[in-house]
Image (tube, rainbow, N blue to C red):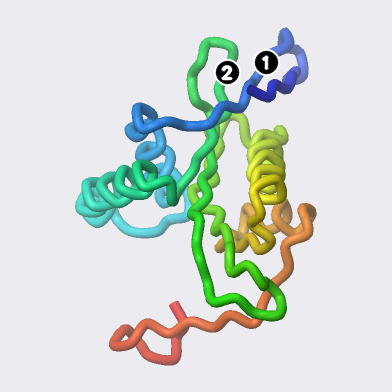
Amino acid sequence: MTSISHRPSGAEPQEFAIREAALADLPVMMAHRRAMWEAMKLGDAALLERLAEPTAAWTRRKLQAGEYRAWLMVDRDGRPVAGAGLLLQETCPGPRNPSGRAGCVMNVYTAPELRGRGLARRLMETILAWCRGNGYPTVTLHASDAGRPLYESLGFKPTNEMRLRPGEGEGEGR
């Protein structure tokens, strides 16, 4: 477990630690994911409620198959206050990634009262170190406007990826 200290101005030191999430943490991961969507204003309450079970089922399957890993930042009392995940993917080998192994960062979330204090950065550094140590030479993510400066500071660059959702306002790229 990695630990860091944080001292909000005028407060006693508060220590945070990073631990890898387990299947038992699924409710916390789902609460973080929903709060992330809400903060990004993606979907109304009814849609997010409909997505709850299929999202939990998908995450459970991926965790059990070893295709998804997640890390939680916990406070001194063990309360998860931030988290991030990594979907492990296999793509077609190519000149930029001869192994075909790639990771997709997902579900980066920090409790609102602790944002801007480096917790997401520490989680991202943990994920990137894991990728380097486990042979995942390519890491992608979809950045929110709020997260983009962090990801750029870690070296992430825009790519040539394009998107189309056939039948949903073709040409809008949403």
Question: 24 or 54: nearer the eye?
Answer: 24
Rendering quarter of residue 1: top right
Across and down, in percent, residue 4 comes to 73, 22
Q: Nearer the viewer, residue 147 or 102?
A: 102
Q: Earlier in the sequence, mark 2 or mark 1?
A: 1
- Residue 84's disc number: none
7 horizontally vs 20: left or right:
right
Q: Quadrant of the C terminus?
A: bottom left
Residue 36: x, y in percent? 46, 47
Residue at 64% across, 48% down = 134
Label 1 Cα crowd, 10 Å radius (few <14 / some 14-19 / many 20+): some
Could you say which disc has been placed on residue 75 in the image? 2
Q: Secondary structure at mark 2?
A: loop
Q: Residue at x 29, y 45 (%)?
A: 56
Looking at the picture, does residue 1 appear above or below residue 61?
A: above
Residue 126, above or below 62: above
Asked if labels 1 and 2 touch by Cβ distance under 8 angstroms, the answer is yes
Q: Secondary structure at mark 1?
A: strand
Q: Which mark is residue 15?
A: 1
Residue 163 versus residue 44 in the image, above or below: below
At label 2, which amino acid type do we have?
Answer: Asp
